[in-house]
């Protein structure tokens, strides 16, 4: 498929946008020449060359993007069991409500009395999400899960600083944690202490007792963890850290399994972040704005970004407001009965599928799963050479999206499956059949899986090459016109 730049022909265009009614900062006919229309823009900031934008007619524009849309795969196309990402159906009513002009056409600098309804949305969402998490206060500024982690860790840092407890520089993180946890802790200026898991994939209590001490700033934990297991010792874990003088951080990105059933606050956590763009009705993975609100207990409220003596802003204004509108619509439409029912269905789906697959594939734990489970293909690979990657690519040829691969990293040849609560039994049965067929195919004709996918718009990609030598920029061919784009100027030799 051609790039839109390759479809460009000088002079073509469409009438979608009105003529600009403000002065242009560059007279396209006279590069580099000053003119009164430049107004206040300093000379060194003015564009020296013409911006390389594609010029295409309206029909071609529409066809281009329709063609692109047909080559993608999303939750509206089919099953999407991407573990840890909660790719579930998001009710259309929530989208509809977020689209109401009273929400979508406001400006953050509008006087307060003109946006009182929106402020009420924020305060109601805070109230309900605090109820669901067992927290006392919440900020909506963080715009993603990792951003929430960073914010929450700054609260913990500010708490110790205020008490002049300067030794506390270490954050304990289990080896089963999501990769963003250690990264956020390092970003917030902490030293990361790795906590190994037991054979069962749970926190090693004895190890934790050894590690926790007067240099411990806190513990970061996901429960259920990335193996999809609920740590039964959770109350003991948070107590050990508190007794050592540290605080406890709950990574609530995957609240799907527990919402309305058990609360991080009751498990002994002081700070939590949520991913509204996973659990609470904003599509995840669309590249659009997310929201990673951070909740905390009363004693930390004075450090929140909004507090006069707090850690300061982590994002402008109120964060990504429309994601909060969707979350509130979701909570209000599901209600006190619907929220735990969604969690129960998520857990039921995961266990149903796990049971169906585990007579062939090796499940990494015999414990009941929460919202997701992990298979290890290490044995299968030993038997016939087919890896988790081969299997994932073969799944693409069978009409649905593959699970998360090679994560968590403590499991060899891992496939992490999160079916979510919004899939029907028929879908889960079909998926189980596909997995079984592929299992037999792997044993009987392993070579056939190594060349998949064959039915997708592009075949198997050179993933190492793509990571080592990424080509992210279109360089226009020298067509005699020679008008290099700004992108090209930005490229320096590697
Ligand atoms: C998705 C996820 C995150 C990160 O969230 P982003 O919005 O992608 O930054 C953190 N922790 C866990 C457990 C997650 O599943």
Image (cartoon, rainbow, N blue to C red):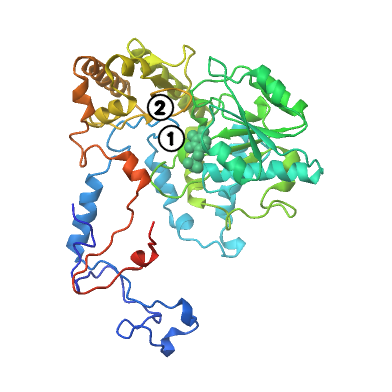
Which residue is more in the foreground, 74 or 32?
Answer: 32
Task: Tell me the quadrant of the picture where the C terminus can be found.
Answer: bottom left
Instruction: Give the CA distance from mark 2 to mark 1.
Output: 8 Å
x and y percent of residue 74 in the render?
A: 31, 39
- Is residue 40 visible from the viewing direction of this image? yes
Tell me the SS state at disc 2.
loop
Give the residue at mark 1: 85
Tell me the SS state at disc 1.
loop
Give neighbour class at mark 2: few <14, some 14-19, many 20+ (Cα, 10 Å).
many
Which residue is more in the foreground, 358 or 128?
Answer: 358
x and y percent of residue 155 in the render?
A: 69, 44
Q: Image quadrant of residue 383?
A: top left
Q: In screen coordinates, is 67 left or right of 206?
A: left
Q: In screen coordinates, is 52 left or right of 457?
A: right
x and y percent of residue 466 in the render?
A: 33, 45
x and y percent of residue 111 in the render?
A: 60, 65
Give the residue at mark 2: 418
Give neighbour class at mark 1: few <14, some 14-19, many 20+ (Cα, 10 Å).
many
The mark that comes first in sequence, 2 or 1, is: 1
Point 63% across, 40% down: residue: 295
Kindly tell me whether mark 1's CB lies below 8 Å from ligand 1: yes
Point 41% across, 88% down: residue: 34
Q: Image quadrant of residue 173?
A: top right
231 vs 121: above or below? above
Q: In screen coordinates, is 103 left or right of 15?
A: right
354 vs 406: above or below? above
Which residue is more in the foreground, 265 or 407?
Answer: 407
Kindly tell me whether mark 2's CB lies below 8 Å from ligand 1: no
């Amino acid at each position: 498929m051609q790039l839109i730049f390759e479809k460009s022909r000088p002079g073509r265009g469409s009438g979608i946008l009105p003529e600009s009614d403000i002065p242009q900062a560059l007279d396209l006919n006279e590069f580099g020449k000053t003119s009164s229309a430049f107004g206040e823009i300093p000379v060194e900031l003015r564009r020296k060359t013409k911006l390389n934008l594609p010029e295409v007619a309206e029909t071609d524009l529409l066809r281009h993007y329709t063609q692109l849309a047909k080559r993608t795969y999303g939750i509206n196309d089919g099953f999407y069991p991407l573990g840890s990402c909660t790719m579930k159906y998001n009710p259309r009513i929530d989208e509809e409500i977020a689209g109401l002009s009273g929400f979508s056409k406001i400006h953050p600098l509008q006087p307060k009395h003109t946006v009182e309804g929106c402020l009420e949305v924020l305060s109601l969402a805070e109230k309900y999400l605090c109820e669901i998490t067992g927290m006392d206060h919440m900020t909506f500024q963080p715009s993603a899960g990792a951003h929430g982690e960073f914010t929450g860790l700054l609260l913990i840092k500010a708490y110790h600083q205020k008490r002049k407890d300067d030794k506390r520089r270490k954050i304990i993180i289990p080896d089963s944690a999501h990769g963003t946890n250690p990264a956020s802790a390092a970003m917030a200026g902490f030293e990361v202490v790795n906590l190994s898991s037991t054979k069962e994939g749970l926190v090693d209590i004895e190890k934790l007792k050894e590690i926790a001490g007067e240099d411990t700033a806190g513990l970061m934990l996901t429960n259920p963890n990335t193996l999809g297991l609920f740590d039964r010792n959770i109350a003991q874990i948070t107590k050990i850290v508190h007794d050592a003088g540290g605080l406890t951080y709950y990574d609530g990105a995957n609240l799907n399994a527990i919402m309305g059933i058990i609360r991080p606050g009751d498990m002994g956590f002081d700070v939590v972040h949520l991913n509204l763009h996973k659990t609470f009705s904003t599509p995840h993975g669309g590249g659009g704005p997310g929201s990673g609100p951070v909740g905390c207990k009363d004693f930390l409220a004075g450090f929140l970004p909004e507090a006069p003596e707090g850690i300061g802003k982590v994002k402008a204004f109120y964060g990504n407001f429309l994601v909060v509108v969707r979350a509130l619509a979701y909570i209000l439409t599901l209600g006190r009965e619907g929220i735990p029912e969604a969690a129960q269905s998520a857990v039921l789906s995961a266990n149903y599928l796990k049971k169906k697959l585990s007579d062939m594939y090796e499940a990494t734990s015999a414990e009941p799963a929460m919202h997701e489970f992990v298979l290890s293909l290490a044995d299968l690979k030993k038997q016939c050479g087919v890896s988790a990657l081969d299997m994932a690519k073969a799944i693409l040829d069978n009409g649905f999206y593959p699970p998360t691969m090679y994560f968590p990293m403590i499991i060899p040849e891992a496939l992490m499956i999160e079916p979510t609560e919004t899939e029907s039994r028929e879908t889960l049965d079909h998926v189980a059949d596909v997995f079984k067929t592929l299992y037999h195919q792997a044993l009987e004709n392993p070579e056939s899986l190594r060349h998949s996918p064959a039915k997708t718009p592009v075949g198997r990609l050179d993933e190492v090459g793509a990571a080592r030598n990424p080509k992210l920029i279109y360089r226009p061919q020298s067509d005699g016109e020679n008008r290099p784009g700004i992108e090209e100027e930005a490229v320096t030799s590697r």
